[in-house]
Image: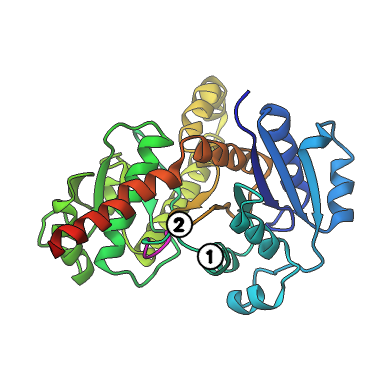
Amino acid sequence: MSEMVKVAVDAMGGDYAPVEIVKGAVMAVNEKENVQVVLLGKEADIERELSQYTYDKARVEVVNCEDVIEMAEAPVNAIRTKKDSSIVKGMQMTKTGETDAFISAGSTGAVLVGATLLVGRIKGIERAPLAPLIPTANGVALLIDCGANVDSRPSHLVQFAKMGSIYMESVMGIKNPRVALASNGTEEEKGNALVKETHPLLKECKDINFIGNIEARDIPMGAADVVVCEAFTGNAILKTYEGVGAVLINKIKASLMTNLKTKIGALLIKDALKETLKDFDVDKYGGAPMLGLKGLVVKSHGNSKAGVIRNSIFQCVTFKEQQINEKIKAGIVEQTKETLSDKED
């Protein structure tokens, strides 16, 4: 049997908490024998949901938390004052190594602040980026950063590129993943000051497969496996993706219901259409990991349902099994030390 992976889950975070969060945790425990879950939040509410399911009680623990961090609260103040919240307790458990990872569908701001202040970055990692998988014509690409670091420096983006490459190769199984820098043109001289400064640094990196700049329109076509940017650009790309995807799906559904002929056609293509749309469902990959931390923190979107939580837990299992943090330390931190040492010599 594989090594047990213990995951702390914020049962109070998200639009469907605790119902869908608890359901997803139980699904994960029932499907994988090496998963242990710690559910954090209002104990009575969590126990009430758990009572509906059959599962291995030895692998599901409930930790009571009296405080709840709401979506609208100021993140820094919430982390500092609500010590008995599910987010703070979950982060602390991951920091001390009591759990291997922490998952939350709650306040993004609180999760980002807590991850930095409580879990902390690996020594030598300058910033921890948020890195979701986004659908493309060829599968998925990693968008790094999409929300954690709005004001980044070139050295930050270089580390993002290296961490993203490690993640896609180890977790997604993509050999020598193509790394691109988000810009307003593919030419090397295009881009803002940050992009122009970062481009030559990435060209010098021998340990990644840097293919140059990428325009936003080429991302859905699968032109790169890792798309590197600061969080302002990344978040704009991500939100545009989500918006356009929702509009297209609604338009397709509406067009198939316009008259009797289209309704008959809809029945004929229903199964094929469902299979096609599954390829664009990133929920099957779980949440967005924050890379470069001492322990794994995964942010699931606020409207996550049971399937997303289940897959986020499986994502944590893969992260540990593939020793991503160890690879980041070896591939980035140690190499940086060697480079600095060479320059000094």
Viewer-proximal residue, 239 or 152? 152
* Residue 149 lies in quadrant: bottom left
109 left or right, relative to 220: right
Residue density around tag 2, few if under 14, some if 14–19, many if 20 or more, within 10 Å:
many
Q: CA distance from mark 1 to mark 2?
A: 9 Å
Q: Where in the figure is residue 59, as x and y percent of width and height?
A: 76, 37
Task: Give the color scheme: rainbow, by chain, secondary structure or one colour.
Answer: rainbow
Query: Dots 1 and 2: beta carbons under 8 Å?
Result: yes
**How many numbered badges does the structure rendering display?**
2
Q: Where in the figure is residue 28, as x and y percent of width and height?
A: 68, 34
Part of the protein shown in magenta: 125-129
Q: Is 104 included in the stretch rendered in magenta? A: no
310 left or right, relative to 249: right
Establish if 54 lies above or below 247.
Answer: above
**Which residue corresponds to the image point at 49% horizontal and 23% vertical from the top-left?**
272
Residue 130, labelled with which disc? 2
Which amino acid does the dot numbered 2 rest on?
Answer: Leu
**Which residue corresponds to the image point at 55% horizontal and 62% vertical from the top-left?**
119
**Main secondary structure along the magenta-highlighted residues:** loop
